[in-house]
Image (cartoon, helix red, strand yellow):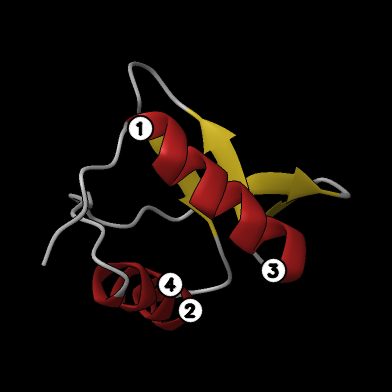
Amino acid sequence: MSLALTGGKIGDRLSAEAETNLAINVLPGLSESYEVQGRGELQLGILIENMRREGVELSVSPPKVVCGTDFGFIAK
């Protein structure tokens, strides 16, 4: 059974998850899309599976490694 959810309700669900799970960061994207940053594919996979069990239908793009600089060195 799937629920009729809007992008805003999915965003609220992701924001609630980010409040309780400090290792997840949710950034709003363009046109009802969200970028979810976490500490690995397994953690994000668990979040996605939990949302699907709650009846949320969503599509997911392949994960990307976020790189930055830390003290002049490249950090992942």
Please provide percent x and percent y for residue 62: 23, 55
Badge 2 crowding class, 10 Å Cα cut-off, few under 14, some 14 to 19, many 20 or more, is few
- Judging by the rendered image, the residue that carries numbered circle 1 is 7
Task: Please state, as top left, top right, bottom left or bottom right, where the N terminus lies in the image.
Answer: bottom left
Q: Amino acid at mark 4?
A: Leu
Q: Considering only order in the chain, which callout, 1 or 3, is on the residue closer to the N terminus?
A: 1
- Under circle 1, the secondary element is helix
Q: Quadrant of residue 50?
A: bottom left
Q: Quadrant of the C terminus?
A: bottom right
Q: Earlier in the sequence, mark 3 or mark 2?
A: 3
Callout in the foreground (3, 1):
1
Q: From what the image shows, is residue 21 above or below residue 16? A: below
Is 31 placed left or right of 3 in the picture?
right
Q: Please indicate, yes or no, whether residue 66 appears anywhere in the rendered image.
A: no
**Res 43 label:** 2
> Counting residues from the N terminus, which is met first, the one under dot 2 or under dot 1?
1
State the image quarter where residue 63 is shown: bottom left
Question: Looking at the image, can residue 53 be seen?
Answer: yes
Identify residue for label 3. Answer: 23
Residue on which the image places disc 4: 47
Residue at point 40%, 81% (across, down): 46
CA distance for labels 3 and 1: 22 Å
